[in-house]
Each structure stands twice: as structure tokens, then as C-alpha cells.
Amino acid sequence: MKIRFLALRTKRELALRSFYTGTLGLTCLTFEENYTVYQVGETVLLFEKGPDPDDEMDPSYHFAIDIPRNQLEKAAAWLSERVDLLKFDGKTEVEHSNWNATSLYFHDPQGNIVEVIARHNLENDREGLFSPESFLRVSEIGWPCIFGMPDRDFELPVWSETDDCQAFGSEEGSILVVKNAEPWTPTGERALAHPCVVMIQDEKGVRNYSRR
């Protein structure tokens, strides 16, 4: 499964535009007064203002972006010049032994927890320097649920499961279901449900899932 499109809400659209295009160097596909669209490797990422930003809770999300598995050290050096990498147990490189992956984390101006992850099982090595072109795709979106179980039928297999979460999809792309108010790694911030639209593609075709 791959995430082809992801739409998230924001109250800081202009600050995010400066961050994602200026700081991270992503390509801006289009922008209007209330939304901006970016290219993140194989994924299109959209941030939009809510219909009534004054009444909406300040939204924050957790999502992950894949990088080549052989560029983790280069990514850490590149990112550390641009963002404050978050620490977990005193380290900026967080190991996920059950996924055979290593992650780096940082906040964007909205307060989203952005994860940059090298999945060592995937053969996606690239030579050369780390650059914005090294962001391969959005590979994970957090999906908090009230009772910790899916609030809808994703029609997707569970490829990883622990006591705290269920990852629906595959190693290349997943919807990560967690209990509402569970702490996100690495900060311990509460996972809260906010409006989201995700378009996925797998062997069954293309499907959209949304929450409003």
C-alpha cells in the first residue's frame, strides 16, 4: 500500500508554507488563500485551513516520511542544520526493533510531529548527498480512535500490531491506529483525532478515507 494523497488541517498555513518550501525545500504544487499543496516524493500533501478556524481546536498530527535506508546519517546532519531534532531517551535516532527501522523526529510550525524514517527492509538505497529529493513518500499517518480500535473498516490488512497500536496497510504505507489521548513517540504529546483525508493505493485500487 502507498499513500498517494494526504490532506491535513492547519491554523498556520503561511508559516507551514515557509517551512516546507523554504526550510525543507519541498516543491509547492499550488497555493491559494486557504490551502497549499506540496510534493513529497510519491505523495501529494495538502494543508488547508478549516471552515471556521476560530472555533476549531488547534489541530496537530503525526505523520512519517520515508527516506533511503542508507541515508539516515546524512539525513540527520542535513536536518539538524534546519530543525531541532527531538530526542527520545536522550537520543535523536530512535530505533524501532519490531519494524527494523530508525527514525528522526521534529516539529513543524503547526506542532505536527514529523517523522523521517529509514526502513531497513526496503531496498531503496540512493547514492549522493541528502536533499529534498531524498524524501520518498509519506508512509504513515496517525489515526487516533476513541476506543483504540478502527472507527471504520479500512479494508486493509494489519501488517503490524502491538498493545498500543495497529498499523493497517504495509511497510510502504500504513494508517496507524492508536487510542485517543495515547502519547506519541518521542514527545509524549497526546494523540488527538482531527479532520484528515488520506488516499491510498494498493492491489485493490485507489480508495479515500476521511474524518471530519
Image (cartoon, helix red, strand yellow):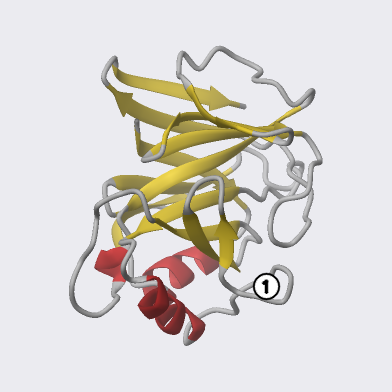
Q: Quadrant of residue 40?
A: bottom left
Tell me residue 41's x, y (percent): 27, 54
Q: Is 53 displayed left or right of 122 in the figure? A: right
For the N terminus, the image quarter is top left
| Residue found at the very far left of the displayed protein | 127
- Can you tell which quarter of the image residue 88 is in? bottom right
Mark 1 burial class by Cα count in 10 Å: few <14, some 14-19, many 20+: some
In the displayed image of the protein, which residue is found farthest to the bottom? Answer: 81
The residue that appears at 33% across and 71% down in the rendered structure is 71
Q: Please say if 126 is above or below 145.
A: below
Q: Which residue is mark 1?
A: 87
Question: Residue at position x 24%, y 55% from top?
Answer: 124
> In this orientation, which residue lies closer to the viewer: 32 or 63?
63
Q: Residue at left 56%, top 52%?
A: 97
Helix, strand or loop at label 1? It is loop
Residue nearest the viewer, comparing 180 with 124: 124
Residue 16 rendering spot, x and y as whole percentages: 51, 64
Q: Nearer the viewer, residue 198 or 19?
A: 198
Q: Quadrant of the C terminus?
A: top right
- Residue 80 locus on image (x, y percent): 50, 83
Any part of residue 200 in sight: yes
Left or right? Give the position of 204 relative to 146: left
